[in-house]
C-alpha cells in the first residue's frame, strides 16, 4: 500500500507538531468516533438478527431484545456526537492557530529580509503566499484526520467481515494492493500539478494587486481593455493548470469507487453462494454490505489523502522557498550606540554596486559638519537615493566606509542608527490609521504635545487639527482624502516626532504648491538649524539654500562646495544654475 513508502515532509510535520496538544485531542476524538462507527455496524447486525428471529418466532421477548439493541445503537450515536463534536472543534482550532502562527512567522521573516529582497519580488506574489498558500497548507490537519479516520474505519470494518465470514475478507484483502498502486501512481503527478496551480494563482494575485494599485494609470492611458485582455490570458493559464489538477482528482476518485463497487458485488455474489449452502443469513449479508461500504469510504478517504497531501506539499514548498527558507543577510553585527551625537557624517571613498551588477556609486567622498545641510543634486539615476539608503544601512557599501561622529556606521546598532534619522521618503506612504497613529510610527509612546509640535513644525497643524480631533483614518473608505502636499507635510511631521539629530529628506517639498513649499521650506529651515540634514533636491533653487552641495552624475561626484563656491568655480553646476536663472532651463534636474 502507498502508506509504506510514504514519508511526511519534515517541514509539514514540524508545523503540525506546533499544535500537537489540539491535534492529539482532535485525533483521539477522531479515533473514538471511527471506532464507535465500527461498533454501530456490529449493533446493526445484531438488530437485524433480532428482526430475523422475530420473523420466525413472533415472540414478545424477542421484541424486547430488539428494543435493547435499538437503545444501544442510539447510545453509541449519542457518544459519537460528543466525539465528533470534539474532533471537529479541536481540529478547527488547530487549523486556525496553525495558520495564524504561520502568517505571523511569515510576516516576521519578511520584515527581517533586506530591502534587496523586495526589490526583486512582486508584492502580490508575496501576498499570495500569505493568503493562498497558507490556506492550502491548513489542509495538512485534514490529512492527519483522514489518515487516522479512513484506515481505522476500514480496519474496523475488516474485523467485522472476518468475524462474519473470513472467506469474504479475502476479497477485500485482494483489493487493497490494487487500490494502493493506483493511488500511489497518481500522487506524484498530482503534486506537480498542484504546485503549478499555486504558482499560477500567485501570478494572478500579483497582477490583481498591481492593477488595483495602478488603476489611475490604467484609466489615464485608456488601457482598460488591454489590461483586461492580459488578465484574461493569465486567468486562462491558471484555469488550465486547475483543470489539469482537477482531471487527476476526477480520474482517481471514481476509479477507486468503481473498484470498490466491483469488490462489493463480488462479495455479495459470494455471499449468495454461501447462502445457498446455508452458511449466510440475510442479517449477515446486510451487515457485510455496511462493512464493505465502510471499507470503500476508507479507500476514498485514502485517495483524497494523496491528492490533498500533494497540494499541501506544493504550498509548503512555496511557503518555505519563497519566504521562510530565504537566507537572511549576515546579521548586522554592530551593537554600538553613541551617547550624544553631534551629527558629523562622512562618506569615505564609498562605492556601491547593486546585487544585479548596476554600479550606482563610484568612490564618493564628502562630509557634512554637525548642524549643517548638504544638498544632493544631479540628474535622475545619479545615485542620490542610493546615498540616502546607504546612510540608513538598507545596503552596505561595496567598498569604502560611512562614518557618524567618527564611528563607522557598520559598528553601530542598526535600530539605534535608524532611530537617529528622521526620514521623509521620495514617495509618501501613510498607513490606513488616523493621523496620530501615522505620526506615532516607530515612536508609539510619543505624547500628544509632541505630535502637535511636530505638525506645527511641518506646517501641517491647521488642516490636520479637525481630522485629529475626530480621529478620521487617513486612507480607506471613510477616510480623509489628503492632497499630495498635505500627505507630504504629514510625512515631514512624522519624521520630526522622534526629534532626530539627522534629517534625511528625499525630495521633501516636491509635491507642494508654491505657497506651501514656501511654508514648508521655512519650517524645514528652522528644524534644520539644529540638525545635520541631507536632502535630495531636484530644484536648484532649493539646493542653493543648503550649506553645501554635492553634484553627482552617474554615481560620481562631479563638484562639491557651497552654492557661492560652485558658482565662482564656473563649472557644470554654475552653468546649469545660470541656464535656468536665465529661463533657458526649467528649474529641475530630474
Ligand atoms: N534596486 C536597484 N537595483 C539595481 N539598480 C538600481 C536599484 N535602484 C537603483 N538602481 C540604479 O542605481 C542608479 C542610481 O539610482 P538612484 O535611485 O540612487 O538614483 P537617483 O539619483 O535617486 O535618481 P532619481 O533622481 O530619479 O530619484 C541608477 O542607475 C539605477 O538604475
Ligand atoms: Mg531617487
Image (cartoon, rainbow, N blue to C red):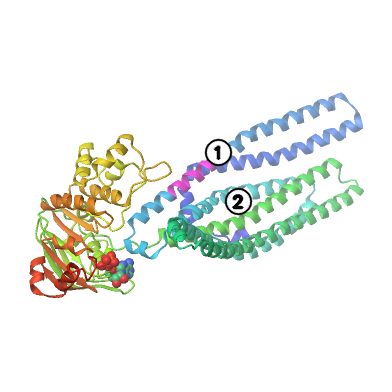
State yes or no: discs 1 and 2 in contact (Cβ < 8 Å).
no
Which residue occupies the foreground of this view, 383 or 158? 383
- The image quadrant where one finds the N terminus is bottom right
Decide if residue 162 is in sight here. no
**Which residue is depicted at the point 63% across and 39% down?**
33
| Location of residue 197 in the rendering, given as x and y in whole percent from the top left corner | 56, 61
Earlier in the chain: of badge 1 and badge 2, it is 1
Q: Is residue 27 left or right of residue 297?
A: left
Residue at the outermost front position: 583
Distance (Cα) linking label 1 and label 2: 18 Å
For residue 100, say whether it is visible. yes
Query: Quarter for ligand 1?
Result: bottom left
Query: Compared with residue 435, is residue 193 higher up or lower down, i.e. above or below?
Result: below
What mark, if any, has residue 79 been given in the picture?
none
109 vs 242, nearest the viewer: 242
Magenta range is 92-102
Amino acid at each position: 500500500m502507498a502508506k509504506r513508502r510514504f514519508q511526511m515532509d519534515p517541514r509539514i510535520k514540524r508545523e503540525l507538531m506546533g499544535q500537537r496538544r489540539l491535534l492529539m485531542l482532535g485525533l483521539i476524538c477522531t479515533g473514538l468516533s471511527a471506532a464507535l462507527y465500527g461498533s454501530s455496524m456490529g449493533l446493526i447486525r445484531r438488530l437485524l438478527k433480532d428482526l430475523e428471529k422475530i420473523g420466525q418466532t413472533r415472540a414478545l421477548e424477542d421484541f424486547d431484545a430488539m428494543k435493547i439493541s435499538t437503545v444501544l445503537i442510539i447510545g453509541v450515536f449519542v457518544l459519537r456526537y460528543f466525539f465528533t463534536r470534539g474532533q471537529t472543534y479541536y481540529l478547527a482550532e488547530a487549523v486556525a492557530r496553525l495558520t495564524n502562527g504561520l502568517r505571523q512567522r511569515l510576516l516576521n521573516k519578511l520584515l527581517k529580509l533586506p530591502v534587496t529582497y523586495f526589490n526583486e519580488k512582486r508584492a502580490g506574489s508575496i501576498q499570495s503566499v500569505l493568503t493562498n498558500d497558507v490556506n492550502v497548507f491548513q489542509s495538512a490537519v485534514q490529512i492527519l484526520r483522514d489518515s487516522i479516520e479512513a484506515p481505522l474505519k476500514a480496519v474496523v470494518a475488516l474485523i467485522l467481515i472476518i468475524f462474519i465470514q473470513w472467506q469474504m475478507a479475502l476479497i477485500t484483502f485482494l483489493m487493497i494492493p490494487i487500490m494502493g498502486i493506483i493511488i500511489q501512481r497518481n500522487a506524484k503527478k498530482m503534486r506537480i500539478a498542484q504546485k503549478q496551480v499555486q504558482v499560477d494563482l500567485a501570478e494572478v494575485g500579483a497582477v490583481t494587486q498591481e492593477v488595483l494599485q495602478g488603476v489611475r494609470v490604467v484609466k489615464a492611458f485608456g488601457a482598460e481593455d488591454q489590461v483586461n485582455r492580459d488578465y484574461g490570458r493569465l486567468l486562462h493559464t491558471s484555469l488550465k493548470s486547475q483543470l489539469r489538477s482537477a482531471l487527476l482528482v476526477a480520474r482517481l476518485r471514481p476509479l477507486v469507487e468503481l473498484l470498490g463497487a466491483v469488490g462489493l458485488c463480488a462479495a455479495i455474489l459470494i455471499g449468495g453462494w454461501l447462502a445457498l449452502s446455508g452458511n449466510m443469513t440475510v442479517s449477515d449479508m446486510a451487515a457485510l454490505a455496511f462493512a464493505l461500504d465502510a471499507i470503500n469510504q476508507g479507500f476514498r478517504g485514502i485517495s483524497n489523502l494523496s491528492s490533498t497531501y500533494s497540494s499541501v506539499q506544493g504550498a509548503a514548498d512555496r511557503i518555505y522557498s519563497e519566504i521562510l527558507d530565504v537566507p537572511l543577510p549576515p546579521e548586522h553585527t554592530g551593537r554600538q550606540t553613541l551617547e550624544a551625537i553631534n551629527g558629523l557624517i562622512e562618506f569615505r571613498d564609498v562605492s556601491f554596486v547593486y546585487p544585479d551588477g548596476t554600479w550606482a556609486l563610484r568612490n564618493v567622498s564628502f562630509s557634512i559638519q554637525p548642524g549643517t545641510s548638504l544638498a544632493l543634486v544631479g540628474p535622475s539615476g545619479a545615485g542620490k537615493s542610493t546615498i540616502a539608503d546607504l546612510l540608513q544601512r538598507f545596503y552596505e557599501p561595496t567598498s569604502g566606509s560611512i562614518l557618524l561622529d567618527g564611528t563607522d556606521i557598520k559598528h553601530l546598532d542598526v535600530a539605534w542608527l535608524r532611530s537617529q534619522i528622521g526620514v521623509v521618503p521620495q514617495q509618501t506612504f501613510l498607513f490606513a490609521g488616523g493621523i496620530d497613529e501615522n505620526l506615532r510610527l516607530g515612536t508609539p509612546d510619543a505624547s500628544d504635545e509632541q505630535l502637535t509640535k511636530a505638525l506645527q513644525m511641518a506646517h501641517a497643524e491647521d488642516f490636520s487639527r479637525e481630522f485629529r480631533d475626530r480621529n478620521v483614518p487617513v486612507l480607506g473608505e471613510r477616510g480623509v482624502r489628503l492632497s499630495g502636499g498635505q500627505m507630504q507635510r504629514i510625512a515631514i511631521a512624522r519624521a520630526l516626532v522622534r526629534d532626530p539629530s539627522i534629517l534625511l529628506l528625499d525630495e521633501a517639498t516636491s509635491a507642494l504648491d508654491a505657497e506651501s513649499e514656501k511654508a514648508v521650506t521655512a519650517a524645514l529651515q528652522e528644524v534644520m538649524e539644529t540638525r545635520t540634514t541631507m536632502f535630495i533636491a531636484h530644484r536648484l533653487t532649493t539646493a542653493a539654500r543648503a550649506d553645501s552641495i554635492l553634484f553627482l552624475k552617474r554615481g560620481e561626484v562631479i563638484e562639491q562646495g557651497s552654492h557661492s563656491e560652485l558658482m565662482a568655480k564656473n563649472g557644470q553646476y554654475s552653468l546649469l544654475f545660470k541656464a535656468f536663472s536665465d529661463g533657458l532651463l526649467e528649474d529641475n534636474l530630474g
